[in-house]
Amino acid sequence: MSTTTWLDDNNRYLAASLEWLRLKLLALVPSDAATPKPATPVVVKRRSWFGIASAPDSLGAEGASPPGRRLPAAKDPALLASAADKRETAAKVDPQPALLLLARRLELSAFERDTLLLCAAADLDPGLGSLLAHTEGNAARAYPTFSLALQLFDDPTWDALSPHRPLRYARLIEINQPGATPLTASALRADERIVNYLKGLNVLDERLASFMTPIGENDASELASSQQLVADVVLQQLRAAAAGSGVPTVRLVGTDTGSKYALAQRLCASINRRLYRISIDALPTQRAEIENLARLWQRESMLLAVALYVDAENLDGSGPEVAAALHWLLSREVGLVFVGMREAPPGDSASSSVIEVKKPTVIEQHEAWKLALQSGGTDEDAERAAQRFAGQFNLSLQDIRLATQMAARESATEPLTARAWNACLRLTQPKLDALAQRLEPKATWEDLVLSDESTTLLRQIVGQVRERYRVYEDWGYSRKMTRGLGINALFSGESGTGKTMAAEVLANELRLALYRIDLSAVVSKYIGQTEKNLRQLFDAAERGGAILFFDEADALFGKRSEVRDSHDRYANIEINYLLQRMESFSGLAILATNMKSALDNAFMRRLRFIVTFQFPGLSERKQIWQKALPADVPREALDFERLARFSLSGGNIHSIALNAAFAAAERGSPVTLPLMLSATRSELRKIEKPLNEAEFR
C-alpha cells in the first residue's frame, strides 16, 4: 500500500472518529443549552514534510458538518450507532490507522484510546472547543478532563489516570493542574508529537532533536572483513534477543570511534532502523530531566524504527553525575541502544552485550592503501607505499578514505604519496597539549656528531620503523608474537650529549611528529590519575603519527621498591602499568636519561635499542664547534682546534656559540675567537668547571 493510500484511510478513520466523538459529546449537552456552531475541520494539504507525505484530505471530510449545517441537538441513539459503525468500518484497513497503531504498540485500553482522541480532538477539529464548553456547562472550560472522559466513554477505568499507565507515563497527554485543582477536573491536552502522529506526520520529537544528531545513510561507512564478522555476530544476538526477553544494550568497546560508528550504522541498516547519536556531554544530569528524556525516547522507539548511539568516549573525563545520568538512561527500557566507550565498566549488568570493535587488521589497511594509492604511480610503487603506510599508521577504512580525499584536494606540487602522508599526520595528530609538548624537528643527520656505533643504531631504528610491515606481516612475525611489536629505545648519556637532537633527527627522517612528555603533568598525587594520563598518552599516539619522547625518563621508569606503605604500593602499580603498556605499544617510544642505573631492570629487557651517548672526545668536539654556527652568521677565522680542547658537551658548545652570536650582534661585528673564548669562560663558570686562564690567553 502506498503512503498516500494509507493517509487517505487514516483521514477517513479520524473523520469518522471525530463525528462519533461529536455525537457522544452532544448526548451530554443539557437539553436547554444553545446549539453550538458547526465545526470547521482542520485541512491538511498533501505535501512533503521532512520526507513524509501528509494527509490529502480534510480530517473532517467523511461525516464532517459542511458549512451552514446545524449539528443535531437531539440525542438519537440510531445516529450514534451509525457513527460507531462507520468508525469500525474505517478501522478495517491494513496497515491500521495511526490511533489504533499507537494503541496497540503502547497497549492502551479502549478507554485510554478514546480519552487520547478526546484530548487531541481540539487540535484536530477546533470547532469542538465550543461543544466541550457546552458539555461542561461552563464557557470557560472549553477543554477535556478526566471527569468528562469517565462520563463519556464506555468501560471507564480509574487506573487510566495512574502515572504508571501509558497516557501519563509515555507523556501522551499534558495535564494542567494549577493550585489545588483536582486531577479529574484539570485541563488535558494531547502532546504535540502525538497529535502529529495521529495526523500521519511521524517525525522525531522536536525536544529530542535538540539533543540528538541523525546519522543518515550517507554517513554509513564500509567495514573491513574482520569487522563485518563482528557485525554478523551482533546481528544474530540482536535478533535472538528480540525474539526473547528484549533487546539488550550493546556496548561497543575500543579506541576507534569511527569503526564503532560504522558498525552501529551497518547493524541499523540491516534491520531498517534510523540511527541517532547523542553525546554524554549533552545528557541532562537532573534526575527528572533524564527521566523525561528516557521516556520520550522510549516512546519514539515505539513510534519510529530508530536506534540510539550514546557517544561515551570521554566518560572517564566526565564527572560522577554524568556517569549516573548515563546509568539511569540505560536502566530504562529505551529500545536498541549502542554505547561507544573505550572500555567496559566493571560490574556490567547482564542486560548489556559487550562487543570489542578493533581497527581493520594491518593486512586490510594495506589493501585499502594499495587501492587508494594506485593512481599515484605504478603498482610496484603503490605496493611499496602501502606497506609503509600500513606499517606506520593504524587507521580505520574511513580515515584512509578521508586521507586520500584530503590528498586529492591539494595541489599536485608533491607526489600523491607525500600528500597522503601529510594528510595522515593531520588526521592522527594526538591531542596531548596538556600532557606533552610538541617539538618541531629541525636537526638532520649532518647536525648530529656521534660515534659510529651510536649512529649505526639510530639508522637501524629508522630501518625497523620503515620495514615493520614486511617483517611483521609478510614474513609472519605478527602471527608468532602478540607483544613487543612496537619499537622502544633508550637514549642514555650525560646532559648535553645529543639525546634530544637525535630524537629530532629520527622524527625528521621518518616524517613523524615528536612529542616530549611533560612529566610534571603526567605524574599525579591522586591515586589512579597517573595511569589514566599515561593511557591517554599511549592511546593518542597509537594511531602512528607521533613519536613519544620521555625526557628524564628515570623519574617515571624508576626501580620498584619494597612496599612499606600505601605510597610504595601505588608507585609500584604505576611502574607495572608502564611495563605492560610499553610492551603493548605499537609505535616508537624513546626514553632519555642520564641515570641509566636508576631504571627498573624490567624496562631494560623490554627495550629494543639502547643507544649510549658518550661524552664527545677531541675530534667530536671539533666537529661540533664547526657546526655550531649557522652558515649565515658572519665570522672571522676561528681556531676550532683550540676551542675543542675545552672539555664541554655538545649542548654547552651550542650555548656558547649562541651567546657569542648575540655578543657580536650587539657590537655590530662578526663572531671572533675572543668572543668565543669569552662565552666559553662564562659557560665554564656556569657549570662550575675549573678554569685555566692560560687557555684563554
Image (cartoon, rainbow, N blue to C red):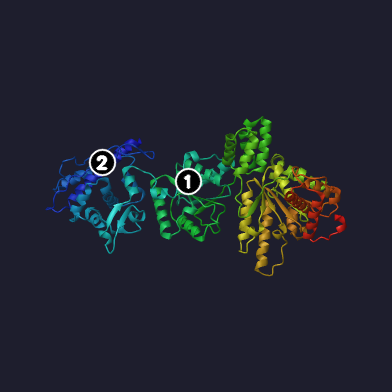
Q: Nearer the viewer, residue 283 or 13?
A: 283
Disc 2 to disc 1, C-alpha distance: 36 Å
Residue 467 figure quarter: top right
Q: Position of residue 394 (x, y in %)?
A: 63, 44
- Residue 145: x and y in percent read 25, 56
Residue position marked by numbered label 1 in the rendering: 239
Work out whether 343 lies above or below 235.
below
What residue is drawn where x is 60% and y is 43%? 426
Vertical position of residue 72 compared to residue 382: above or below: below
Kind of residue sitting beneath label 1: Arg
Earlier residue among tags 2 and 1: 2
Q: Secondary structure at mark 1?
A: helix
Q: Amino acid at mark 2?
A: Thr
In which quadrant of the rendered image does the N terminus lie? top left
Q: Is residue 522 left or right of residue 463?
A: left
Neighbour tally class for label 2: few under 14, some 14-19, many 20 plus, Cα within 10 Å: few
- Quarter of the image containing the C terminus? bottom right
How many numbered badges does the structure rendering display? 2
The residue under the point 41% across, 59% down is: 288
> Furthest-top residue in view?
378
